[in-house]
Each structure stands twice: as C-alpha cells, then as structure tokens.
Image (tube, rainbow, N blue to C red):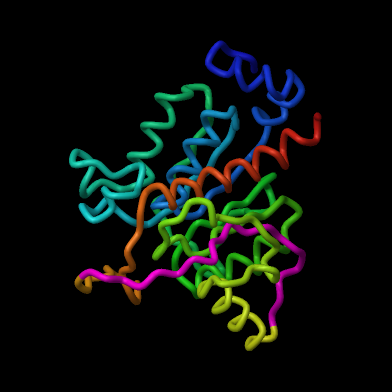
Amino acid sequence: MSTPALSRVERLLGADGLAQLAQARVILFGVGGVGGWCAEALVRSGIGHLTIVDPDCVDVTNINRQLPATTRTVGRPKVEVLRERLLEINPLCSIQALQERYTAGADFQLGSYDAIVDAIDSLTDKANLILEASACPGAFFSSMGAACKMDPTKVRVGEFFAVRGCPLGAALRKRLRKNGTLPAKKFLCVYDEEVLPNRGPELDPGPGKAIANGTLAPITGIFGFTLAGLVIRHIAGKSL
C-alpha cells in the first residue's frame, strides 16, 4: 500500500515493487549488532510482514553497536524494544516478536517465508539454520562475523563457499563438511576479510558465548543494511 512515508521507495521501485514488499513475509534471526539495523531498514523500506527472533535482553555492553540498546532499555527483551520502535516507523507493518532461540528442531515454519535472514552468533545454531533455511523455497541470506573490524570499505557480499578471510565462515564450512551435511542450495553472505586483534582487556562474553570480541557500530550497521538491501532487491526485483 502506497503511503506518504513510503513515497521515496515507490519513486524508486514503482507501485509493483512496493506492492511486492508489502506482501512479502520475512523472518530475521538475531536482532543484535547486525540484525537490529537490518530489521529497521526492512521496515523503513516497506516490508509488510516481519518476524524477529532473539532470546536475549538488552545489556549495557550492547549500547555501542545495537539498535535496540539505550540506557532506557537495558534489561528489556530486545525483540520487544525493537517491535515498539518498528511500529512507530510503520504502524501498518505486521511484526511478530519472538523471544526465543533458534535451535535444531525448533519449528518456525520457515517454509512460509519469502526470505530468511540469519544474524545469529552461535556457531552450532548458525550451522543448523543454514541447513534448514537453504532447504526452504524462500531466499536465504546470512551474516558472517562482524567483530574485529574497522574498515567499512572491506565489507563484501559473496556466496557462502566463496567467502574468504572470515574465521566464522571457515569454521562453519569445516563443521558442515565434517558432519557430511551441506546446504541444499547456494546463498549469499555478508562478510569482511579484515580481522584485527583485540587490544583491550578481556570481557565476560555472556551466557553461551565463547569470547567477547571488539565491535563497532559502523561495521555492524553496514552488515545489517547490506542484508536488508539483499532482501529488498530479491523481493522487489521481481517487479523491475
């Protein structure tokens, strides 16, 4: 549906492209440093149905890079904070917020979505999501590691098996091959070959995480916006 708030989107994509976005169903796993920015870009661009999935609450250490994190939201579920913000941007958007963790065997009905976006950190969960999502009819897009980076010009997009210089991507491919399980189809990833050392003191990584790496909002933001751009191009491109 055309509205004044989306007039610049319609100007670029046309009425048919805007209609495709309004009808699209997208599910996003992880709304932290990368996923929060992705969610906002999708809603500002006219996506009509968005499901956001994340088990975590806002922590003070998230404030440097995560969209839902402010001094007022510490302690609240990230998906609840983000849903409130997204509905302020576009009250017509259907937004489902699930404070849950993606795990193997969890039923998120992925086959019902036009696009599935992976912005989660856990190596095990990420590998399982890659296998499930790549077997679904909808498009699948994944974020590789966005930590330990400073140069925004080095952010890239590439097919999963063509990603180079990313420790997370290498670890995922190694795990999948070792288990004898490969993605059912090719999919695009956002990645960056730059890997800088951590120079500050060690930090508590939090529950379920092996290490707390240094991160910057400009990089996580570019990762998230790039993911959103891939989704929008895939969906609206059908009408261009």
Please tell me which residue lies in front, 48 or 231: 231
Q: Quadrant of the C terminus?
A: top right
At 62% from the left and 53% from the top, the residue drawn is 109
Q: Is residue 8 above or below residue 130?
A: above
Q: How many marks?
A: 0
At 44% from the left and 46% from the top, the residue drawn is 221
Q: Quadrant of the N terminus?
A: top right
What segment is highlighted magenta in the picture? Answer: 181-200
In the figure, is residue 87 to the left or right of 166?
Answer: left
Please tell me which residue lies in front, 184 or 198: 198
Q: Is residue 203 above or below residue 113?
A: below
Please tell me which residue lies in front, 230 or 137: 230
- Residue at far top of view: 4
Q: Position of residue 24 (x, y in %)?
A: 67, 36
At 35% from the left and 73% from the top, the residue drawn is 197
Q: Is residue 20 above or below residue 66?
A: above
Q: Position of residue 134 (x, y in %)?
A: 70, 62
Q: Position of residue 153 (x, y in %)?
A: 53, 52
At 39% from the left and 65% from the top, the residue drawn is 148
Main SS of the magenta part reads: loop
Q: Position of residue 191 (x, y in %)?
A: 56, 61
Residue 50 magenta-highlighted: no
In the figure, is residue 211 to the left or right of 92?
Answer: left
Quarter holding residue 143: bottom right
Residue 186 magenta-highlighted: yes
In the figure, is residue 56 to the left or right of 169?
Answer: left
